[in-house]
Every structure is written in structure tokens, then in C-alpha cells.
Amino acid sequence: MSKAYKKDGKFYLEPDPVITARTNSKADRAKIKKKLTDDELRDVIDRILTRLDALDARLTDHGTASRQQEKNLLDYN
Amino acid sequence: MITIIRDNQGNIKTYSQSPLESYNVALDETFETMEIGLVQYAERFKLSAPAITGLLYASPGESVDVIVSTNLKVHTVDVNVNGVIETVQIEDGVGVISLALDTPGLFILQPADRREYCAAGTGNLTVEILPNE
């Protein structure tokens, strides 16, 4: 979940790096067809790793939730 | 009359007009009943963006006002906005939280005091700000 903060009476969201990386994915695909500088390449890889980390975390969370559900069922039975 | 189910921390999980006799109480949940109508109970805490309850999809833009309403005689209600607790002033049963829609992501709003107010149904509101493609 994105972090929220209040400023001048309104709530704002802090930019989520995963959403930012996802939003840039089409541009990144187009970009890698051209020759990139080291910095550009580093940025593209950073965005890919950010999205991979988020995917990994989701898979791990699901594993944890499944194990907890299994434990609850065993406890209940 | 309604039936209220609380979790083992005393937080309201859900409520129903049914007596829920066959409900499978697990994990130390508890039942209680209240002599009140379902609609009246649901209006103890309600969140809505203009005419929308539950889920609002929004494009990046200016801002949206979320209406916090309650039929209880209170001057303030604490609302949880993505983990930040906001004390909302209530006048004539209504208060407002303003959300800026400039950053893609999710705002998740729900009552901060889950023992007093239920987050089910219209008690929670998700505002998803979709990125521009």
C-alpha cells in the first residue's frame, strides 16, 4: 500500500516505485531497442528489479497466507 | 434486531439481519445482538466519494472529497487513511476528507476504531488512481 501524507488540508500519496516502474515499462521496451548509455541501462535494470522484488514479495505473502490457512484448518479440526 | 460478529480483538468483523445461528465461529470470534435495524446500523459509519461507495477508479487529476457520515451524535470520527489516522470534524452527521489524485496508487480508507465502527460494506472506501498510459 502506498504511503499517504497530509499537506495543506489534503491527503497525498507518495509515489510507489513499483507503479512508477510499471508505468515506464512500455517506454523501457522501446528504449532497449536503441543503444543505451550506462546510466540509462542502469535505470532500466533498476526498474526491472523493482518489479521483480514486488512479484517475489507477493508470491512469498501468498505462501505465508496459505500456510496460515492450513494451520487454522488443522487447529480447528 | 441484528447480529454482530467480533474478532478476538473485539473488532467488528461483520453484521447481519440474520441470527447467524449456523455461523462457524472460529479463532475466538464472538456474537452479540443489538435491537436496531440493519440500515440504521450501517449508517453508523459510511464513506463515499461523490455518489460512489466501495471502490472508485479515478484518473490523475485535481482531487476528490470523501464524505464521512455517521448517524451517531459525535463531533469527530477517526478515519484511517493508508495507516494515517485523521480526526474528521463532523457537522450534522457529515465530515469531509480531501484526497489529491496526482499520484497513481491506492487510497484505502476505513474506520480507525474498529470496535466502534464496522469496516464492512460502505464502511470502507478504496480510491484507485490509475496511471495515464
Image: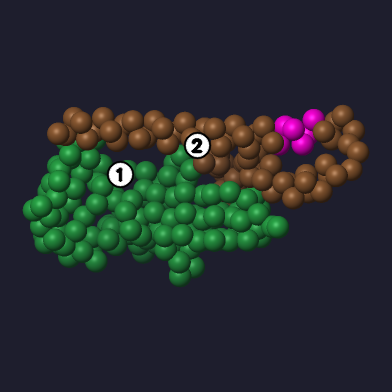
Task: Identify which residue is drawn at 42% across, 60% down.
Answer: B54
Name the disc covering residue B114, or none. 1
State whether residue B130 is above or below residue B87.
Answer: below
> Based on the displayed image, in which of its 4 quarters is residue B16 positioned?
bottom left
Camera-side residue: A32 or A9? A32
Dot 1 and dot 2 residues touching (CB under 8 Å): no
Chain of the residue on which disc 2 is drawn: A
Residue at the disc numbered 2: A58
* Colouring convention used in this rendered image of the protein: by chain
Residue A19's quadrant in the figure? top right
- Please give the name of the residue rendered at 20% of the width and 64% of the height, measured from the top-left corner: B38
Q: Secondary structure at mark 1?
A: loop
Asked whether the viewer can see residue B68, the reply is no
Query: Which residue reaches farthest front?
Result: A33
Name the image quarter holding residue A52: top right
User: In front here: A75 or A3?
Assistant: A75
Q: Is residue B106 left or right of residue B67?
A: right
- Residue B90, given in percent of the width and then of the height, sits at 39, 56
Q: Position of residue A24 (x, y in %)?
A: 73, 46
Label the magenta part by its dominant secondary structure.
Answer: helix
The chain to which mark 1 is attached is B
Quick check: B118 left or right of B132?
left
x then y, percent, for residue A49: 67, 32
Q: Can you say which quadrant of the picture contains the C terminus of chain A?
A: top left
Q: Which chain does the green colour mark? A: B
The residue under label 2 is which amino acid type? Arg
* Residue depicted at 8% across the width and 53% down the height: B21
Boundaries of the magenta span: A42-47
Q: Nearer the viewer, mark 1 or mark 2?
A: 2
Q: Colour of chain A?
A: brown
Residue A17, position as x, y percentages in the image: 65, 38
